[in-house]
Image (cartoon, helix red, strand yellow):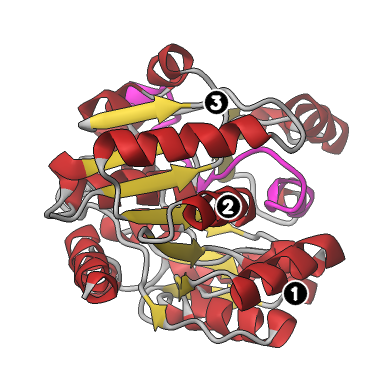
Amino acid sequence: MVNVMQLVQHFKIGGLEKMVFELSSKSSHSQETHVVALEGECDDVINSWPQLSALSHICCLDKKPGVSLKIIEQLVELIDKYKINIIHSHHIGPMLYAACAVKKRPNVKHISTVHDAWYLNNWRYRWITKLLCKFSPITIVADACAVADEVYNKVDFKAQQIVINGIDSVEFSPLNMQYARYQLNLPRKMKLIGCAARVEPGKGHQVLLEQLVNFSDEYQLVFAGSGSKLEEYKLLAKTLGVEKRVHWLGNVNQMVTFYSAIDVFCLFSEREGLPLSILEAMSCNKPVVASNVGGISEVVTSHCGVLLELNEAHLLSSAVSSAFNLKKDNVIREEAIKQGCSRIMAAQYDALYHSVLV
């Protein structure tokens, strides 16, 4: 029997969290999978993300800021209660607490997926990761070749496997554009550039707003997501004189509707691993314009969109125009299904689970 604990920091909706949801749902061991968040309370997270209620077992440990030995004991109790034999951690905090719990229960195998190695720029996190990889038996997985290379360069540890994050291509299928725009109260005749990301520093919102002045008036921006920079960026749009061409939707529950409503998806982040939002947009047959960071170039080909270097933000207008004119048909969607299907991802992780238990 394979009893898996998926361990995350929190259940705030993001690419990592959606990947864990997909994996937990699509795994052949979904009924034996326990999804545990270090932070938060279950009632709150279910209210903010109702789809989580579809998972068989979900638990929040309500961890407060700082190191907590109590969390280790809670994890050990869950391991014993549910006969967990694999902990699959995601990101540095869960990796640390999972490694500590496994020290107390050495028969439990520990797999950790690195979704984005940017945190290794911090010397403390590099030091912790090096120690964990050296002294704790962890099977490291990267979600893109670029992420695996960065892990190796930063901590001199080679990822044992690369598993591309996957999305549900059945769920993410294109809807009628005009219907989608009606549902979201968006203008029918404008050319809409969409971005779905937390409104936080480094996610590209500021660059898109600043560059919008270089687009013709028929182009407008549509942002899905919320975050600490929302009010600041709204003020920036007003200062730039483009506030009437920017639509702030906040958190969108029906992301298929969002992707179906836009013409081009644009993500100009300073750092990424392999963002699920790009695969979701592509699965809805939308061309992509993105910064060439992380593993984005591994899925966005010239048939699917345009990649720019971080110092080429001034080329966003021409890049969006080129992407807008890409031949659609179903080429982009087919590429997304081939590159990042959640069922393929789950099957690869299931095979890994069985291999570490042998």
Q: Which amino acid does the dot numbered 2 rest on? A: Cys
User: Are the residues at dot 1 and dot 2 in contact (C-beta closer than 8 Å)?
Assistant: no
Q: Position of residue 55 (x, y in %)?
A: 24, 32
Q: Position of residue 250 (x, y in %)?
A: 55, 26
Q: Nearer the viewer, mark 1 or mark 2?
A: 2
Q: Secondary structure at mark 3?
A: loop
Q: Which residues are magenta?
A: 182-211
**Vertical comparison of 326 with 208: above or below:** below
Residue identified by numbered label 2: 100
- Identify which residue, 198 or 273, lies in the foreground: 273
- Residue 279's image quarter? bottom left
- Residue 91's image quarter? bottom right
Check if residue 188 falls in the magenta segment: yes
Give whichever of discs 3 and 2 has the lower sequence position: 2
Residue identified by numbered label 3: 250
**Vertical comparison of 174 with 290: above or below:** above
Check if residue 54 falls in the magenta segment: no
**Vertical comparison of 328 with 223: above or below:** below
Residue 292 appears anywhere in the view: no
Q: Residue at x 50, y 54 (%)?
A: 90
Label ID, residue 312: 1
Q: Nearer the viewer, mark 1 or mark 3?
A: 3
Give whichever of discs 1 and 3 has the lower sequence position: 3
Q: Secondary structure at mark 1?
A: helix
Indicate left or right for 252 with 70 as reference.
Answer: left
Give the CA separation, mark 3 to mark 2: 37 Å
Q: Residue at x 49, y 83 (%)?
A: 145
Q: Nearer the viewer, mark 3 or mark 2?
A: 2
- Identify which residue, 316 or 339, lies in the foreground: 339
